Image (cartoon, grey):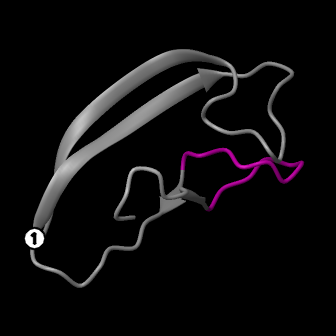
Amino acid sequence: MDNRNDPVNYVDKDQTGAPIGLKTKWTTKNEPSSGGTWQIVLKHQPDLKGSNSSSKDGETDLDITFPITVE
């Protein structure tokens, strides 16, 4: 990920095949150290979760941004 708009690669799914989002895979570029922020958003999505759901669906329960440094 080199842009906050890049998709997140979920590696965990529920029994119906819908992504859960607790395990993700990130790939960084082979560049010198860089920094930025990492945002975690927890959504409440009853009856909305599906294979085409996104982080824009549902109500936000938690929204936290952390500073990060990739070395």
Range shown magenta:
11-22
- Judge from the rendering whether residue 26 lies leftward or rightward of residue 13; answer left or right: left
- Residue denoted by label 1: 33
**Residue 37 in magenta stretch:** no
Residue at 66% from the left image edge and 56% from the top image edge:
12
Q: Is residue 1 left or right of residue 12?
A: left
Where 7 sits versus 21, above or below? Answer: below
**Residue 32 drawn at (x, y percent):** 10, 78
The percent coordinates of residue 61 (x first, y second) are 52, 15
Instruction: Reply above or below: 53 against 57.
Output: below
Q: Is the magenta region chiefly helix, strand or loop?
A: loop
Q: Position of residue 41 (x, y in %)?
A: 47, 30
Q: Nearer the viewer, residue 69 or 7?
A: 7
What quarter of the picture does the C terminus occupy? bottom left
Position of 58 compared to 31: left or right? Answer: right
Residue 35, visible in the rendered structure: yes
Q: Decide whether residue 16 is among the magenta residues.
A: yes
Residue that appears at 67% across and 39% down: 54
* Quadrant in the picture for residue 30: bottom left
Residue sitting at x 36%, y 37%:
39
